[in-house]
Image (cartoon, helix red, strand yellow):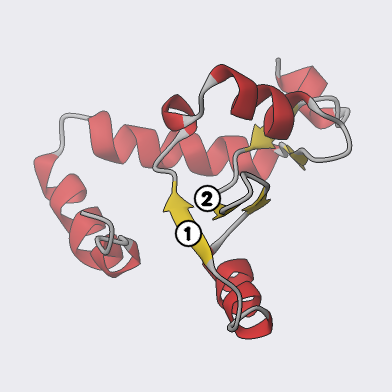
Amino acid sequence: MPQLILEGHVYIVVAPLYRILYKDSTSIYLKDDTTLKQYRKEHKNENYTVLRYKGLGELDVNEAKEVLMNPQKRTLKQITIEDAKEAAEIFEILMGKDAQLRKQFIEENSYLADLSSL
């Protein structure tokens, strides 16, 4: 696997964070909070519902096919060795035996958590 990452062959599909649903059942997907903010600014006089996804498990089969498998609509992110190293370090902190490191990580990064949908 490391060789595939080094050669630039490993990608992950990034699921959308929001779905904009109109009354006529048409919809669009938005990737993040910044995109949603911009969309709301540009479409403030339109009537739509915003659905927020917490993860891939909330997408039904048709939604997953539409936004994850369709090459025209999906978002791919290339995985780099730096990504893999950072993920391994964070995994070790969060799942390792050193509770003090875990506590420190949570204290330093808790401001990044979005609890607005809870």
Mark 1 element type: strand
Residue bearing the label numbered 2: 17
Q: Is residue 12 visible?
A: no
Q: Earlier in the sequence, mark 1 or mark 2?
A: 2
Residue bearing the label numbered 1: 49
Residue depicted at x 88% and y 38%: 72
Which amino acid lies under the numbered mark 1 shown in the image of this protein?
Thr
Residue depicted at x 68% and y 82%: 42
Q: How many marks?
A: 2
Instruction: State left or right for residue 102 relative to residue 55.
Output: left
- Percent coordinates x, y for residue 37 in the rendering: 56, 76
Q: Is residue 11 above or below residue 80?
A: above
Which amino acid lies under the numbered mark 2 shown in the image of this protein?
Leu
Structural crowding at the residue carrying mark 1, measured as other residues with C-alpha within 10 Å and reported as few (<14), some (14–19) or many (≥20): few
Q: Is residue 84 above or below residue 112?
A: above
Structural crowding at the residue carrying mark 2, measured as other residues with C-alpha within 10 Å and reported as few (<14), some (14–19) or many (≥20): some
Residue depicted at x 80% and y 20%: 4
Instruction: State left or right for residue 110 relative to residue 76.
Output: left
- Quarter holding the N terminus is top right
- Percent coordinates x, y for residue 71 in the rendering: 87, 31
Residue depicted at x 71% and y 21%: 2
- Percent coordinates x, y for residue 82 in the rendering: 65, 44
